[in-house]
Image (cartoon, coloured by chain):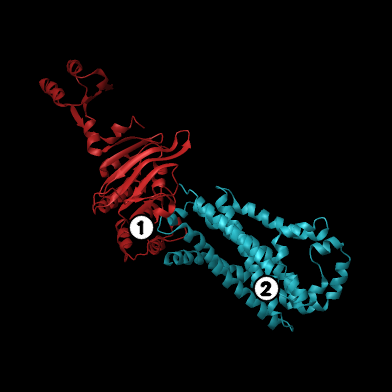
Amino acid sequence: MNENFLEIKNLTKDYGNGKGALDVNISIKPGEIVGFVGPNGAGKSTTMEMIMSLIEPDNGTRKLFGENIKSREDIQKVIHRIGYLAAEGGLYENLTAMQTFKYAEQLYGINVNGEYQRLATELQLDLDKKIKALSLGNKKKVGIIQSIIHNPDLVILDEPTSGLDPLIQQQILKIIKDFSSKGRAIFLSSHNLAEVQSVCDRVIMIKNAKIIFDDKTENIIHDQGKEIKLINPPKIILDRIRNVIHDDSIKEAGNEVTLSVKRLHPIIKILMEYDFEDFYILKPSLEERFINMY
Amino acid sequence: MKKTLSIINFELKSLNRFYIWWNIAWISMILLIVPFYSSISEESEKFGELYENLPEGIRVAFSLDANTLSTIEGFINTELVELLVLATSILGLYFGARSIQREINNKSLLFLVTKPVSRFSIFFGKAKAVLISSFFANAVLFGFVYFAAEIMTTETISLLYVVSSFLVIMLYLFLYYSLGLMLGVLREGGSALGVGVVAVISTFMFNIVSNLSDKADFLKYLTPYYYLDLKTVINDNVGINLFNYFIILSITVTFFIIGYLIFKNKDIDT
């Protein structure tokens, strides 16, 4: 039961000039939500498309639910256990949302008895509108629902919330969280690091076609240290702080001074000594951790 | 099997909508043309004199033979079926080219290729839908031709001619459909339709040019319009040689196989 749903080793698709995906290693366990981040063109979609056998890798191995995927025919053995949302497209514009779900039902050979109607109501989606008449946000909703309609064990979502307003982003993230709580694994790519931080157990970063980072979200945030922002601190306090931390960890901007520290205690002690209260501690975020890597 | 049926059903919906309008257009044309048969056949001698004044090359190239107007089969062939052959060839090409290439370009094919259906089912499911839809649409059309000729003229149209025309139209449709499919999966992001239309016009012109001089006679072997020539049925009242059907079917099957092998191994990315 603890067998990885997904295991790819040295998966490579080389388009040249650092494009594609080179020697990518990823494994995903049941119940995990894994975020896949990286700049545009870094190789996120290429990796996901290789997992789905939409494009065939030049090298490397793929295992899905223990099955070796050596060719497009092999993925047919397990594809009913996978849901996929493409970054764009993937829907027939002349069908209504309802017809799309019914068509998906037929192709999966299932009858979910209107489960998609419940999801559509939850997401405030008009089932009778043609896809071409829907907004980008509503198209994404249709895409998400069709990707989970068959209760897959692994859902691969390529930028499920890109280009959406915050309200719809939240609705979609809620659907993803609810779905994962049933023990399914989710592998989602995103540019929105706050979103990845809020839903993902693990984060993988890819840059220039290579994985440069793969760790649990909590570890990343913990390792990152903390930030303290001081508002208009007296010079004497700053001089004391400079004795405790390195100058590189102190950033001054206008009347604000930001301190990056591993431990809070020595700084707080100094501030208390001078009875200085105009400061606040910033919650660490993935964005701050990764922004320099982008 | 059920999944392939779902693909066929899905394709049939849009094909049937198209074929309703297609048949309405052609049936309207039949209703306009057939009533003129009696008067034109009576005047066929005058047409003969008119044609005699034209250069021989033009007469041969465009099959301007007054004798063909004196029989109902010849009349229907000249005024309707020859045009239908060209239109059907382009239609087949259009169906083939838009079927997979358009779905790759607009990324809607991702819906199918990420579901538990093989590429074989997708490729041939679409082809089966075209076969079914075209079969019934053309059966209705040629049924109408038969009854229109029976009711609106005093002559009995040869059933052999009607059935042969139906078969020839179906074969042209599928020949160019398979060509369109093959070009569609072969040409990355390009216009298979444009290339295909050039192929249709070229092969049609080969047939005309091959009639103009002995030196160009060899061109007739390069065009399907030579192998499936309905004039044999009209003039000799015998069916088209089975070997000729076989040649066109073989080319069609070859295009299908090549198209499928390319599609099977094609990367479909976003």
**Badge number at residue A116:** none
What is the three-letter code of the residue carrying label 2? Ser
Task: Report whether A43 appears left or right of A182.
Answer: right
What is the three-letter code of the residue carrying label 1? His
* Residue beneath the point at 47% across and 57% down: B119
**Which residue carries the number 1 mark?**
A80
* Residue beneath the point at 63% across and 52% down: B194
Residue B203 position in % (x across, y down): 71, 57
Task: Kindly indicate the quadrant of the structure image that contains residue B132.
Answer: bottom right
Chain under numbered label 2: B
Task: Report whether A264 appears left or right of B102.
Answer: left
Counting labels gives: 2
Residue A130 position in % (x across, y down): 44, 59
Secondary structure of the residue carrying tag 1 is helix
Label 1: few (<14), some or many (≥20) within 10 Å? Answer: many
**Which residue carries the number 2 mark?**
B164
Task: Output the letter for the chain in cyan.
Answer: B
* Residue beneath the point at 27% across and 43% down: A200
* One can see residue A239 in this view: yes
Task: Report whether A260 appears left or right of B2.
Answer: left
Residue B218 position in % (x across, y down): 77, 57
Nearest the eye: A160 or B252: B252
Does residue B127 lie above or below A261 as drawn? below
Q: Colour of chain A?
A: red
Chain under numbered label 1: A
Residue B150 position in % (x across, y down): 69, 82
Quadrant location of the N terminus of chain B in the rendered image: bottom left
As measured in the structure, the alpha-carbon distance from the residue carrying label 2 to the one carrying label 1 is: 46 Å
Nearest the eye: A269 or A60: A60
Secondary structure of the residue carrying tag 2 is helix
Marks 2, 1 in one chain: no
